[in-house]
Amino acid sequence: GAYAISNPDMDTWNKTPALFASAPEARLLSQTTLPEAISGRVTAIDYQPESQIYALTTSDNWVYILDNQFKLLTQAQIDGMYMLHIETLSGVSFTSANSLLVMGFNKAWAELVLDPAQNWEMNYRRFNQSSDGIGETARGQFSTVRAKTSYSLALGYSKALDQYVTVTTRDELNENLVVSRFDKGDMTLSAEANFKGLEGKALPQLTGISVDDEQAWLLNNDASEVLQLNLLTGEVYSGVKLPGTDNPQGLLVRDGQLLTVSQINGRNQLQTFVM
């Protein structure tokens, strides 16, 4: 129909130039091969500092929890057809030491809990497969206004605002990218803003976000470029370039470091940069 857009295909889209050609390059500090047991291409990453654990989502709709040495702790494959359709997972964000939200590119989400009491028998309708220690507590779909005909490949959470954050990605229909914020209490839309500062530039493919209070870092997959975003105004600023990445997905900024995941020689590689 008139509002139809193509599903995002991370392997075939046409790349656009860097938005800020003069941005400095970050330095590659390390590259870690993630466990071979991870099924699919990693699409998002987050870290929980209190529990010292990572969460990853993949193109096969798996959610993996790893310790700070990247050892697998627990895992679940989301059934995207239970109750409502959750498309390929593209975002993940912790909200506490044992709770997190994962999101498909159609902005449908599942709320998960990490609890030793959870097992497969309790979650067999919501998960295709799972190990013990992870369960689902709710699922739904973010409803937007400016972004209602757009997909999103990035989900974050602002503790200061107590809001989830999504940003749209480029498609053939829409002329703007949109940042949307949702109240954590009832998951309803609190505010939206069109991106500002991209006038006259080709829209990027955004495949990652890392939120810090009222600011966010965005991953421009097209040019392996990290941008800065004011969540309240939608203003976009120059950031840094990430040399040596390959179709990077997911972004985590912590302790002055930027982490993203490339797929190199068929393996998920966690790349850590310093600014």
Image (cartoon, helix red, strand yellow):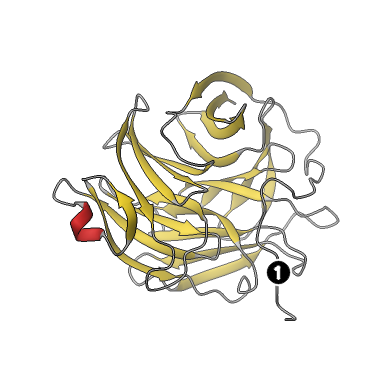
* Residue 79 image point, x, y percent: 39, 60
Task: From the image, tell me which residue sits under label 1.
Answer: 5
Classify mark 1: residues with Cα within 10 Å, few (<14), some (14-19) or many (20+). some
Please state which of residues 42 and 127 is positioned toward the viewer in this rendering: 127
Q: Is residue 219 above or below residue 7?
A: above
Q: Residue farthest to the bottom?
A: 1
Please state which of residues 30 and 35 is positioned toward the viewer in this rendering: 35
Left or right of 179 on screen, residue 155: left
Q: Residue farthest to the right?
A: 200
The image quadrant that residue 102 belongs to is bottom left
Residue at x 13%, y 50% (from the top left corner): 117
Task: Indicate the quadrant containing the N terminus: top left, top right, bottom left or bottom right.
Answer: bottom right
* Residue 145 image point, x, y percent: 59, 77
* Residue 140 image point, x, y percent: 40, 70
Residue at x 56%, y 56% (from the top left corner): 231
The image quadrant that residue 55 belongs to is top left
Residue at x 48%, y 72% (from the top left corner): 189
